Image (spheres, rainbow, N blue to C red):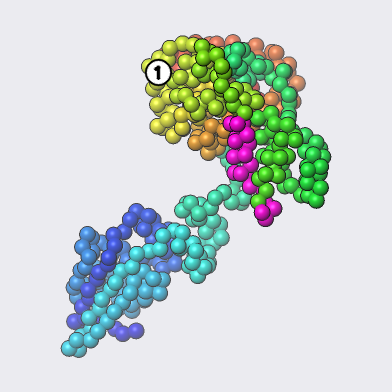
Amino acid sequence: MKNIEENDTFLLWRHYTLSNTDRKVLAMLYLPLIGFESFGMYSFFDSLLGEKEYYQGPLNNLKKNLNIDGFHFILAREKLEAIGLLKTYKKNINDKDEYVFDLQQPKDPKQFFSDVLLVGNLEKACGELELRKLKMIFGLTKKIDSSFQNVSAKFEDYFSVQDELFFKETENKSYQTRENMKDSYFSLEEFKRIFAEKEPFGNADNIDENTIKILAETADLYHLSMDNLVDKYLDSISSRGVFVEKAFIKSVRSSIDKTLKKEVNQEEDKYIKYLGDTVVSKKLEAFSHYSPIEVLFHLTHVKPQLDDYDLIEELEKDYELIPSVISVVIDFTLASTNGVFAKNYAKKIARTLVYNQAGKDSYLAYMVLFKQVQNMKNKQNDKTVPLQNIDTSLKQKEKNIFAENNQEETSLPEISEDDLVF
């Protein structure tokens, strides 16, 4: 290294402009590696250039502005060079050195995490846990690491579901009670038996618990037979013998779409001319064809009010729900509140879907809410207090609560923990 002389000069230039992502990468990924002095030098170079492509001046001014001596100036500069953020050129003219500092653009997140040397040194600098967090922040981890604990609010933390109001039938507009529903359409023993018949060289005992959970939830949601479920499972196995969840869900949806038929009688309500294997499949198909307002009108047979339009707009803009998912929110709200499109209740359901990352897919939205209802049902069955007594008091409280639904939001009572059925 050479000491900086009084008459040394520099020319600073670059051929790009830092984006917000570039600045985020510098601050979160490069800073732990190069330290504050090198990071400060790069940031100062960036501010000197501004919108210009080049800047020139005496080298000593850089030291003064950075408030570092010549040794630390050179050390900070060489760290930038070593990590690829700066290229330095020098020539001697009349006993003085003239430097050219060519500022380099930082790597994008994908390039950075693809560099084994950078990632290895970053892990040494900040630790394994922090490295995982950084990958999540920059969207390079498809799923949350198992070392993190899910602390999201659960459905039963905010909602109660009346036992006699589970799903609303679309063809006759009557309610289907849980007592008339099959507890579970999934049987692991039957699944293994059929699997052995269809795949004699396979072994269903090797299927992991998470996959079994997905199969069980899908069978219950769509009322699939075990024979059909095994077929869908086998169709979703990759060439490497790995179960592909996305392919499985796509296969299930595709088979349901193919079973949909239109009613011949055109005088029938357009909403119910879509027929499928289950109530859920019919609803999902209808929700994909009609707007939330149309769905609300069909389910209530009452002309939507201005407040209804405002609430639907809020669910779309503030909660970022797609229209078909908003229809799911409407359906569950009406089924749980005696046909009242209650604002606070709908927003709580929306929050549950957002927390569970189900705001962009009506299938996943139904899956999340279906699972929560099933969990509540299991908890209710474990209670020693008769359900009839609980339901009676709950209905009375709900009547008092939702009678005030048309008042201002500030006067609408919140559902307290005493009102919830656990």
Taking the spot 33% from the left edge, 74% from the top edge, the residue there is 87
Nearest to the observer: residue 72 or residue 164: 164
Horizontal side of residue 277 vs 107, given as left or right: right
Q: Position of residue 330 (x, y in %)?
A: 51, 22
Q: Quadrant of residue 409?
A: top left
Q: Is residue 55 above or below residue 190?
A: below
Quadrant of the rendered image containing residue 391:
top right
In front here: 179 or 75? 179
Would you place residue 201 above or below residue 317 in this image? below
The answer to whether 416 appears left or right of 25 in the picture is right
Residue 303 position, x and y percent, is 43, 12
Q: Position of residue 281 (x, y in %)?
A: 60, 27
Which quadrant is home to the N terminus?
bottom left
Q: In terms of depth relative to the viewer, which is nearer, 55 or 404?
A: 55
Residue 165 magenta-highlighted: no
Taking the magenta stretch, the answer to whether it contains residue 255 is yes
| Residue named by callout 1 | 307
Q: Is residue 114 above or below residue 97?
A: above
Can the viewer see residue 395 in this picture?
no
Name which residue lies at 70% across and 44% down: 234
Pick out the residue farthest to the front. 264
Indicate the amino acid at tag 1: Asp
Residue appearing at x 42%, y 19% in the figure: 308
Task: Give the crowd class for mark 1: few <14, some 14-19, many >=20 residues within 10 Å.
Answer: few
Q: How many marks are shown on the rendered structure?
A: 1
Image location (x, y in percent) of residue 65: 24, 68
What is the secondary structure assignment of the residue under circle 1?
Answer: helix
Eyeballing the image, is 132 above or below 118?
above
Q: Residue at x 45, y 62 (%)?
A: 111
**Image quadrant for the C terminus?**
top right
Magenta stretch: give its range: 239-258
- What secondary structure do most residues of the magenta stretch adopt? helix
